[in-house]
Image (cartoon, rainbow, N blue to C red):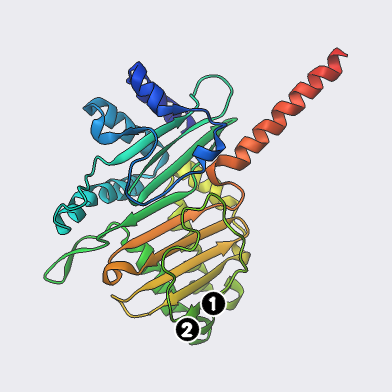
């Protein structure tokens, strides 16, 4: 899997001319830029898909597909395509386009130094860092506007359907007592609470825990976590899932339980934050994100790499004298 990610990134770099490389490439040590992420529309550092040649655009998609699972790549492609649908709904006033997604590279996949990239635009942000053979890919944001496209009451397209349906199924399964613990507010936040902050501010977990659920409901809570982690290829998702402390998860819901009305939920653990909200446009506009408290932007991998490098240097100095 790492071989695929590396090869896809090298292929993209190999297709760039000198001017494009200058715009696309930054140092992995540029922490300010690496942590400056977002999911609102607008220009970004790097190269925009709409200005690239066909083979270069395909190479960007190739990079994305080496990190995402097949179903999550389909979700990402649908999210990007929705920009044209949204532009049509708005009458073209904001000039949205499915080519308005940006790629920036941090370092290069040559040698032993860490490297990474970000692919980002409206409702999509995938942040990848590779260090010492390990891959990090959070924050991972997917949104959708419109969240549902319908015809005579039937859904034509709904790229984030499971993100809503599994949470509703959990609420139905857990029963009234646990549901009273899970629903912590009748009001919804304006957006996901972590927004596009570079760091997650620790907050006291609220809601219901696995110990307060019966076995089927507890398993469904784990399924929701797995849904978000399975946005990555199974090799990465399995490693991330193995680090989850399932007994310390908390699930909370805010807002209405009625379909078509604003709602929000959060799954929180010691090293896990999942947020989902659907509040805008009559609950037809979704934001969802998966983050890791100490590992966003590959910060844990980069710290471990620096520690190992310092240890190697110190060991060399000691041996020499």
Image coordinates of residue 51 in percent, x first then y, are: 25, 31
Nearest the camera: 293 or 36?
A: 36
Task: Answer few, some or many: residues within 10 Å of disc 1's Cα (few below 14, many 20 plus, some between 14 and 19).
Answer: few
Image coordinates of residue 68 in percent, x first then y, are: 39, 43
Residue 11 can be seen in this image: no
Image point (38%, 62%), residue name:
163
Residue that lies at the very extreme toward the right in this rendered image: 321
Report which residue position mark 2 lands on. Answer: 175
Quadrant of the frame with the C terminus = top right
Task: Answer few, some or many: residues within 10 Å of disc 2's Cα (few below 14, many 20 plus, some between 14 and 19).
Answer: few
Query: Height in image: 192 above or below 188?
Result: above
Q: Circle 1 — which element? A: loop
Looking at the image, residue 33 sits to the left or right of residue 206; the answer is left
Give the quarter of the image for residue 304: top right
Image coordinates of residue 1 in percent, x first then y, are: 46, 33
State the mark number for residue 246. none
Image point (50%, 59%), residue name:
194
Report which residue position mark 1 lands on. Answer: 214
Nearest the camera: 24 or 262?
A: 24
Looking at the image, residue 231 sits to the left or right of residue 300; the answer is left
Q: Are marks 2 and 1 in contact (CB under 8 Å)?
A: yes
Residue 173 can be seen in this image: yes
Image point (59%, 59%), residue name:
201
> Could you tell which of marks 2 and 1 lies nearer the N-terminus?
2
| Nearer to us: label 2 or label 1 | 2
Nearest the camera: 73 or 93?
A: 93
Looking at the image, residue 17 sits to the left or right of residue 242; the answer is left
Query: Height in image: 104 above or below 292?
Result: above
- Give the Cα separation between the discs numbered 2 and 1: 9 Å
């Amino acid at each position: 899997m790492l071989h695929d990610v590396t090869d896809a990134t090298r292929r993209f770099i190999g297709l760039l001319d000198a001017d494009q490389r200058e715009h696309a490439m930054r140092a992995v040590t540029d922490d300010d830029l690496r942590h400056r992420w977002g999911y609102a529309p607008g220009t970004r550092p790097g190269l925009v898909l709409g200005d690239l040649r066909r083979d270069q655009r395909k190479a960007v998609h190739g990079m994305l597909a080496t990190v995402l699972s097949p179903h999550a790549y389909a979700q990402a492609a649908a999210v990007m395509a929705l920009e044209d649908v949204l532009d049509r709904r708005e009458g073209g006033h904001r000039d949205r386009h499915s080519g308005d997604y940006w790629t920036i590279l941090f370092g290069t996949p040559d040698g032993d130094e860490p490297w990474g990239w970000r692919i980002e635009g409206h409702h999509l942000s995938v942040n990848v860092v590779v260090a010492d053979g390990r891959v990090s890919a959070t924050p991972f944001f997917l949104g959708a506007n419109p969240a549902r496209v319908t015809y005579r009451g039937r859904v034509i397209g709904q790229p984030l359907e499971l993100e809503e349906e599994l949470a509703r199924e959990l609420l139905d399964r857990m029963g009234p007592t646990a549901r009273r613990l899970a629903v912590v507010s009748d009001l919804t936040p304006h957006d996901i609470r972590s927004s596009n902050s570079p760091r997650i501010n620790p907050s006291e977990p609220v809601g219901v825990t696995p110990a307060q659920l019966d076995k089927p409901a507890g398993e469904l809570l784990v399924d929701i976590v797995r849904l978000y982690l399975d946005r990555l290829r199974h090799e990465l998702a399995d490693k991330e899932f193995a680090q989850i402390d399932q007994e310390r998860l908390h699930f909370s819901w805010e807002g209405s339980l009625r379909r078509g009305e604003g709602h929000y939920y959060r799954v929180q653990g010691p090293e896990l934050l999942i947020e989902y909200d659907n509040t805008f446009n009559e609950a037809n506009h979704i934001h969802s994100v998966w983050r890791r408290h100490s590992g966003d932007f590959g910060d844990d991998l980069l710290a471990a790499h620096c520690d190992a490098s310092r240890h190697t240097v110190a060991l060399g100095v000691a041996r020499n004298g």
